[in-house]
Image: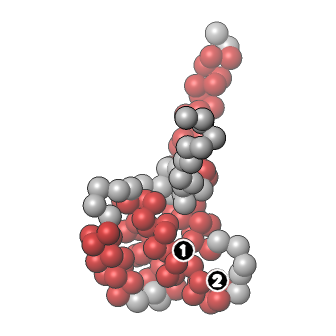
C-alpha cells in the first residue's frame, strides 16, 4: 500500500492554537456571553451535541467544528469581518499560554546555543 493512498484527516485546529485545550472551551463561551451577549443556550447546545456525538474523540476538534458551523457565521456578520473571528478570539484567550510556551522555547534554544 502506498503512502499517498493513506489520507490523514486534516485538523480543524490551526497550528497557532495547538495549546488550546478542553479547559479553554468554557473560557470561550463565558467570554462570548460577556462580550458579544451570546446566549447561554449555545453553550448548552454545544454540551448536548458534544455528549451525543463525541464518544472519546478529541473535544478541541469537536469544539472548532461546532463553533465554525454554528457560531462563526453570526460573529462574522455581527463584527463585519471576513476572517475567522473565533480563531482570533481563541488565540486572545490563550495568549498567556502562548507567551509562556514561546518563552520556554527561547530559554531551551538559548541554553543549547550557549553550550
- The residue indicated by pointer 2 is 76
In the structure shown, which secondary structural element does the residue marked by tag 2 occupy? helix
Q: Residue at x 72, y 78 (%)?
A: 82
Q: Quadrant of residue 110?
A: top right
Q: Residue furthest top?
A: 115
On the image, the x and y values in percent for residue 95 come to: 56, 56
Q: Quadrant of the C terminus?
A: top right
Q: Which quadrant holds the N terminus?
A: top right
Camera-side residue of 98 and 56: 56
Percent coordinates x, y for residue 7 in the rendering? 56, 48
Residue 77 appearing in the image: yes
Position above or below: 114 against 44:
above
Q: Using a 10 Å C-alpha cutoff, classify the residue at mark 1 as few (fewer than 14 neighbours), some (14 to 19) or many (20 or more).
A: some
Where does residue 102 sit, x and y in percent of width and height?
60, 40
Judged by depth in the image, the label closer to the viewer, 2 or 1, is 1
Q: Residues within 10 Å of mark 2 (few under 14, many from 20)?
A: some
In the image shown, does 6 or 74 lie closer to the viewer? 6
Q: Residue at x 57, y 54 (%)?
A: 10
Mark 1 lies on residue: 68
Where does residue 44 sit, x and y in percent of width and height?
31, 81
State how far apart marks 2 and 1 are (Cα): 11 Å
- In the rendered view, does 33 fall on the left or right side of 80? left
Amino acid at each position: 500500500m502506498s503512502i499517498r493512498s493513506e489520507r490523514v484527516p486534516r485538523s480543524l485546529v490551526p497550528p497557532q492554537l495547538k495549546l488550546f485545550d478542553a479547559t479553554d472551551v468554557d473560557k470561550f463561551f463565558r467570554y462570548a456571553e460577556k462580550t458579544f451577549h451570546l446566549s447561554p443556550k449555545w453553550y448548552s447546545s454545544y454540551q448536548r451535541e458534544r455528549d451525543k456525538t463525541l464518544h472519546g474523540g478529541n473535544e478541541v476538534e469537536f469544539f472548532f467544528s461546532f463553533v465554525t458551523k454554528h457560531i462563526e457565521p453570526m460573529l462574522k456578520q455581527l463584527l463585519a469581518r471576513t476572517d475567522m473571528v473565533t480563531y482570533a478570539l481563541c488565540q486572545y484567550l490563550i495568549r498567556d499560554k502562548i507567551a509562556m510556551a514561546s518563552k520556554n522555547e527561547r530559554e531551551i534554544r538559548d541554553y543549547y546555543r550557549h553550550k
